[in-house]
Image (spheres, helix red, strand yellow):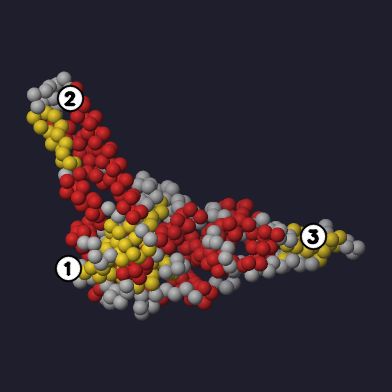
Amino acid sequence: MGQERVAWAKMAAVLVTARLCEPSSELHIAEDWYRRTALCDLLQLGDEEVNKDRLYRGLDRLLAHKAALEAHLSARCGELFAVENEVLLYDVTSTYFEGQAEANPQAQRGYSRDHRPDCKQVLVALVVTFDGFPLGYEVFAGNTHDSQTVQTIVAAMEARHGALGRVWIADRGMASAENLAWLRQTGRRYVIGAPKSELKKFGSELARRDGWRTAQEGVEVKLARHPDTDETVILCRSDDRRSKEQAMHNKFSRRIEQALERLSARIARSKKPLDPAAVNRQIGRILQQNQRAAARFAITLKPDAGPAGFRLRVDHDPSFDDWAALSEGAYLLRSNISDWSDRQLWKAYIQLTQAEAAFRIHKDQLNLRPIWHQREDRVQAHILVCFLAFVLWKSLEMWQQRAGLGNSPRTILEELARIQSHDVVLPTAANGEIRLRCVAQPDRAQAALLDRLGVVFPKRMRLPKDEPPILALSA
């Protein structure tokens, strides 16, 4: 280490910058992308020095510095953007493999957020600050349940960033009884979503009209106590969610009714006895495919004098409609924080959209998925490069916002990518030439953008070390 001809830090910079600007394979970076960029001049690294083998070795070297990089970036972000990390948002996603990944024990089949249950996958658990700046992540086997990641993530993040005053915000997938008990017993504070099934414990509170307060337009919240753990429970009602859940219940109810009507007609047309067990299996499939409204229907086979031997009887359970009317649009959160208001608790939980947005950017903008690498260490390194590219993405986004330029880093990158550099070659009387690398003048829109960002472009660039900087003798 330290004696290599090309510093590994430069190769890491190439990998991460490529992932931010034009996500692609290491082969594409080496054969096409790198020579089209200014990195040759900025890094003082010639095109011929960047090849796929060196990039792969750079991946292998980078992974060992994961924890140190996370700690450094957290501190640096605090200096640049005054980002505080007392409130941490935590979420989990999956990303799938192309290929069998037989050499990677973490590549397993599990619940796929990418709707690719046919592919092996890994789980990525990400922690971001209240403003959405990434602090760290861990990778788990693809068949790991969300709740099994909590204690590992909490311990890892606190080891790197400290534990004092931390508040953990997580979705209901992490809200197992074991995790909540562990968080309370170890003195950690949290706001965590709870499964919809827990709402039934608070039916009387939902029905009561008093105690509700407006958190924002269309959203009401109300505090209660959990009967088993004495936690603070935040009951929430959303108009938008109510409309969505009503539409879903109506949609699945119609599907069930239409399917049962067709089944009843087939039974009525039958010219011979039918097997009740086979018909019950058909009913089971109909209900299973429309689970959201299945509990609304009570379906029985009644004896009948017709050829089939029975007929279909369908009844509606009124308790389903009563509970739906009360619970549609409602959800609850659990917390052991006693010194925050109902609005503060709700707003902290809603910030989980920052973690969800981080995953969307990882997948859609930085091409975290699909994973083409097959070895476990290369997969881990690929995810680390995506994480570091997202740090750059989020830094540029925060920079944009402060400059009043919105929050679309891709627009900035595409606009600045049109600025080019050119070599100006001047022949001399001494049978040589002077070569100058000049930066093209930005157009008015680009100049305004650079001015808002506070960036000053140089008029000339320094040629790479292996090229004569000013005078080059001609052949």
Q: Position of residue 100 (x, y in %)?
A: 40, 48
Residue located 23% across and 70% down the image: 231
| Residue underneath mark 1 | 228
Residue located 79% across and 60% down the image: 424
Please state which of the two labelled residues, at mark 3 or mark 2, is closer to the viewer: 2
Residue located 36% across and 75% down the image: 166
Using the rendered view, name the quadrant where residue 457 is placed. Answer: bottom right
Q: Is residue 387 left or right of residue 342?
A: right
| Residue underneath mark 2 | 268
Is residue 414 shown above or below 392? above
Label 3 to label 1: alpha-carbon separation = 77 Å
**Is 473 in front, or is 264?**
264
Q: Quadrant of the N terminus?
A: bottom right
Using the rendered view, name the quadrant where residue 470 is placed. Answer: bottom right
Using the rendered view, name the quadrant where residue 233 is placed. Answer: bottom left
Please state which of the two labelled residues, at mark 3 or mark 1, is closer to the viewer: 1
Q: Is residue 383 left or right of residue 425?
A: left
- Please name the amino acid that badge 1 sits on: Asp
**Is 468 in front, or is 285?**
285
Label 3 to label 2: alpha-carbon separation = 87 Å
| Residue underneath mark 3 | 424
Q: Position of residue 184 (x, y in %)?
A: 25, 73
For the residue labelled by badge 1, is the local secondary structure a helix, a strand or a loop?
loop
Residue located 40% across and 65% down the image: 351
**Residue 40 visible in the picture:** no
- Please name the amino acid that badge 2 sits on: Ala
For the residue labelled by badge 2, is the local secondary structure a helix, a strand or a loop?
helix
Q: Position of residue 187 (x, y in %)?
A: 28, 77
Q: Who comes first in sequence, dot 3 or dot 2?
A: 2
Label 2 to label 1: alpha-carbon separation = 52 Å
